[in-house]
Image: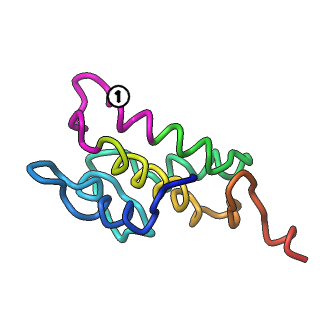
Amino acid sequence: MEGANESRGKTLFVEAAEGKPSCGSCHTLADAATVSQIGPDLDQAFGYACRQGFDESTFFGVVRGQIDLPAEGGEMPPDLFTGQDAVDVAAYVASVAGRNIEGCGETTTGAVTTAEDDS
């Protein structure tokens, strides 16, 4: 995602925001080495869509939407991230979630490639 800092997004995902839980305290994500039973496992949640060919921009939109408007009454706190922080976290998650799921393959922005495509 243009203007996003995925490295910073990973740091924000793993470390708690001031007075709020970290994403990784509730979500499993292999790339971030986080494991939790509270919120959805993001690798599993995005793995199927990745295998179906959905691209990183789609994942970014979903994650950004969840950050901006978490389910009312859910455990995800509102305003966990805003502005550039939300962009960075969403871009990070979109770039890595589900990529460890068999059949997903490597992704690049806007496209999904598989091992067969690399030949």
In the displayed orientation, state which residue is furthest to the bottom: 119
Secondary structure, mark 1, is: loop
Question: Relative to 28, is 45 on the left or the right?
Answer: right
Question: Relative to 112, is 57 on the left or the right?
Answer: left
Which quadrant holds residue 104?
A: bottom right
Within-10-Å neighbours for mark 1: few <14, some 14–19, many 20+: few
| Residue 103 vs residue 8, the one in the foreground | 8
Above-or-below relation of 100 to 73: below
Above-or-below relation of 78 to 56: above
Q: Horizontal and vertical percent for residue 45?
A: 50, 46
The quadrant of the image that shows the C terminus is bottom right
Above-or-below relation of 41 to 34: above
Residue in the image at 31% along x and 45% along y: 39
| Residue 83 vs residue 79, the one in the foreground | 83
Residue in the image at 28% along x and 64% along y: 14
Q: Horizontal and vertical percent for residue 15?
A: 22, 63
- Which stretch is magenta? 64-81
57 falls in the magenta region: no
In the displayed orientation, state which residue is furthest to the front: 3
Secondary structure mainly formed by the magenta segment: loop
Amino acid type assigned to the residue bearing label 1 in the image: Leu
